[in-house]
Amino acid sequence: MNQKPNRASRARFSILDFVIILILLACAVGAALRYDLAGRLFSSSEPKEGTVSFTAEALTDSQADAFAENTQFFSDGKPFGKLVSVSSSPAVGYYENNEGVYTEYEREGLFDLTGSFTCELVRTDGGYLLNGKTYIAPGSVFPLKAGGVSVSVLILSVEAAE
Amino acid sequence: MNHPLPEKKKYTFNFIDVLLIVVILAAAALLVFFFKERRIVVSDQNEKAEIVYQLEISPMREEFRNLVEIGDTVTDGSYLLPIGEVTDVAYSPCFYIGFNKELGEQVSSDFPGNITMTVTVKAEAEITETGFAVNGRELILDQTFPFRVPDFTGIGKCISVTTVQNDNRPAAERTGKEG
């Protein structure tokens, strides 16, 4: 004799399901807040090529040599930009002399570099985003890698092409 | 005819239970993260006040002058939350304080290529037991924190915090510095 399926065994929406859904929603909201997912997902702007100028101070010979024009640089494993211009000068340091005055001196064997990269930029209300993801503005410091060296550069200006 | 009572189903630990535990652990981890990162701030008091605070960026490279504009939204560089709106920006020379060993006294000299920038920010702050907090950022005098505006980022030192009612003077007068 066939038995009718037991009603109690059927899937029913219970308070436990509701709690699970709430927790899942909380997780999603938390992740969205943490990683600014909404801003990224709904960012309508396409990246545009722009110019980012920089300075890097007190570089050794081998570090300075890595800054060859047209070299692609990376930051945190992601493309940063291609070096389009660079100039080098003897590194400048400062010390306090006997009179207590802040005095400039040349740091022998070290170099200060200035130059510019072409990067992919997105303009948002909060400023420029490198590759549409990472905030970049004058004053930012990026650790860059290329040619087997790692150098921290200070961003001096950011301009997207019109 | 009496039906026999259905046999009580034996409880077994299944996939849904594992999922449930994982979800609860993830939610707990998120809560801990947000409280630890102070993205969620629990305050004993909900009293709020409109405040004006000043951030001093010194020494700052001369080429960064004029990048902060009135009306810019200031974002906390650590928590990435808005912490007010720029109402004034002032610049002044930057000095290096050294010690003249011959005279045995403190002297100040120019800090080459650098200036001091003072940014005045208006914000709605929570009144906490220790002072004021804006979106979780405690404003403590002489303490530094990273901040952003659209076209500049740096580390600012909080040099003043006043409630708006007590602070109707212009920024230059409050700092005593020239623009």
Image (cartoon, rainbow, N blue to C red):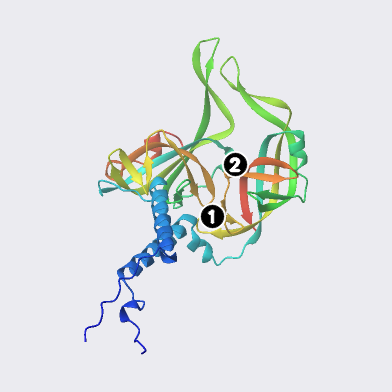
| Quadrant that contains the N terminus of chain A | bottom left
Amino acid at circle 1: Gly
Residue carrying label 1: A127
Residue B102: % across, % down: 55, 9
Residue occupied by mark 2: B63
Q: Residues within 10 Å of mark 2 (few under 14, many from 20)?
A: few
Pick the residue in front: B134 or A63: A63
- Residue B143 screen position, x and y as percent: 42, 35
The image position of residue A154, as x and y in percent, is 62, 42
Q: Is residue A38 above or below residue B139?
A: below
Q: Which chain carries label 2?
A: B
Q: In this view, does B66 lie to the left or right of B28?
A: right
Residue at 39% x, 58% y is B24
Q: Distance between the residues labelled 2 and 1?
A: 18 Å
Is the C terminus of chain A in the top left, top right, bottom left or bottom right quadrant? Answer: bottom right
Seen at 30% across and 69% down, the residue is: A15
Q: Quadrant of residue A129?
A: bottom right
